[in-house]
Image: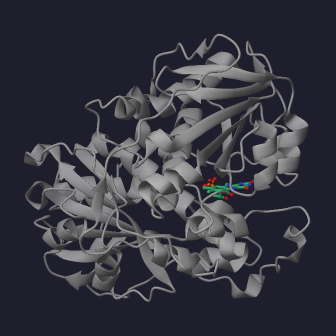
Amino acid sequence: MKISGSIAARYHEATKYNPTTIGNLPDADVRAQPSPFKDYHTERAVDLIAHLPSELFPEAAERASAPGSPDPNSRLARLSRLLYFTYGATARKVWEHGHQIFRAAPSAGGLYPVEVYLATEGVEGAPDALHNYYVPNHQLSPVFDGEWISELSALSYGAFDPTSVSAVMVLTGVYARSIWRYHQRAYRRILLDTGHVFGNVAAYASHEGFDVLPISCFHDDGVNGAFFFDPEQEQAQLLVAIMDRRGGGRAPTAVDWRRDDEFGASANQDFLEYHRASALSKSPRPVPRFSPSTASGNRPPVDLEFPPTLSTSPMAQLILERRSTRRFSGESVSWEQLCKVLRAAYDGIRDQLAGGQSAPSLQTPELLRTHVLVRDVTGLAPGIYELDPMLGSLNLFEEGDHSEAALRFGLGQDLVGQAAAVVIHSADLTTAIEQYGERVYRSLHMDAGVIGQFMNLAAMHHRVGISGIGGFYDDMVNETLGLSSDHGIMYVTAIGASA
Ligand SMILES: Cc1cc2nc3c(=O)[nH]c(=O)nc-3n(C[C@H](O)[C@H](O)[C@H](O)COP(=O)(O)O)c2cc1C
């Protein structure tokens, strides 16, 4: 890679899995697993359960029928459902020695390193405060009282108008929860997880009358300082401005990308070192957007000809039922199914790339490349394709069955080898970092996670099995796809028929 001075590039290189060194990584000590929850033990918790859809939650139905029951259309009720369908507890598994709570968003290893906070102002039923969303009780715990929205707008360099925003979500990473098992590479998975969580926000918000704007460029020290986070333990990854259409809020617009870094001098490849090197200060410089190039294969492109259907589906039900597939049957999926999943996931992104009106859901969509490795899709020749999001087509690069290579680069996981199709997101890190600076490495992972979540929801809707895959031998993926070493592999998603 040419950008040897970049800490992002060095961190990426140092955290690649490699068959000869992966065995040197220490095993996780099961007795030392950190709790996936943060309990602020407040007596002023804002109960959100009463606002959940009563047809899905008997407890909510009981509370809703009590005298003085809450208005289901109030802002607090709609925020309650937004939080629940973003990251709420949707399943529980009982093990021999305890139980595990599964959430609305998937998480690498089920470790849930992302913590959700919500700043509210003028929301009836909740104090103006920075709250923590406490998942086990579905409640807001006020952490710091006060009006925070103007402050968060200033710390986001004015990305949103504070007078039209009723809440701001802050998604953080609690590092130990994931480091515990994944060591230095945990940071990459935490960013992907953050993208999945925001994917739910973006998919669900409009159902409650909210417009949302993701903001990955913010003044790190300012935001983290507001929470008094210990930077070695937890830091903010993404802010989400939440505008209430019913309150006359203005629809958000795309944010300028900003950078103010020089390539760092550290020789360290520690994720915290990278995170620090990519922090933004008080007055970063805006950078003009990079123009995307379109993919062209060696055959006429195959059009993704089916109309998107995700927006008309019962989104809440989909999120509630979503689970990662644990085993594929090995059977084929149809071209129509694959096509619908890709179309549903990419339709809004295409609009964003084309400068359309829909709210942006990604930070740097023009930098991500999407390859689809087809093993067994009826109606589509096996081979390696590249998706062109602008044209809505798949371009065949190399015909042939590459499932053995997929099994190998997927750390031998059957889920990858038996997938009908494997979707791979990558980015030319040299170009990306030269253009946007160190921080782009964060947004590339979060964007890949957002697309991953859109694909998850679309796959649920079309009854196709799917799972994110964060563990892969990076260089082998490059080799399989014929990508130069400048390309960093962000994320792999396996799609197939559920066993
Ligand atoms: C970023 C990310 C990486 C993941 N990597 C893998 C993987 O390599 N192998 C696997 O079997 N599952 C993987 N998963 C799926 C998780 O194990 C799954 O989301 C988690 O167990 C929670 O279950 P649920 O998605 O059904 O709620 C990944 C999920 C995410 C979000």
Q: Quadrant of the C terminus?
A: top right
All told, the count of numbered labels is 0
Q: Is residue 365 left or right of residue 213?
A: right
Image quadrant of ligand 1 equals bottom right
Q: Position of residue 475 (x, y in %)?
A: 78, 52
Q: Quadrant of residue 402?
A: top right
Q: Is residue 341 left or right of residue 121?
A: right
Q: Position of residue 464 (x, y in %)?
A: 66, 32
Residue at left offset 24%, top offset 45%:
211
Colouring rule applied to residues = one colour
Q: Position of residue 439 (x, y in %)?
A: 45, 63
Residue at left offset 47%, top offset 71%:
136
Q: Quick check: 369 above or below 135?
A: above
Q: Nearer the viewer, residue 232 or 48?
A: 232
Residue at left offset 12%, top offset 61%:
162
**Residue 268 in view (yes/no):** yes
Q: Nearer the viewer, residue 261 or 34?
A: 261
Q: Position of residue 194 (x, y in %)?
A: 49, 60
Q: Is residue 347 left or right of residue 10?
A: left
Q: Quadrant of residue 459?
A: top right
Q: Quick check: 99 above or below 449?
A: below
**Residue 472 in view (yes/no):** no
Q: Quadrant of the N terminus?
A: bottom right
Q: Is residue 150 left or right of residue 498?
A: left
Q: Quadrant of residue 184?
A: bottom right
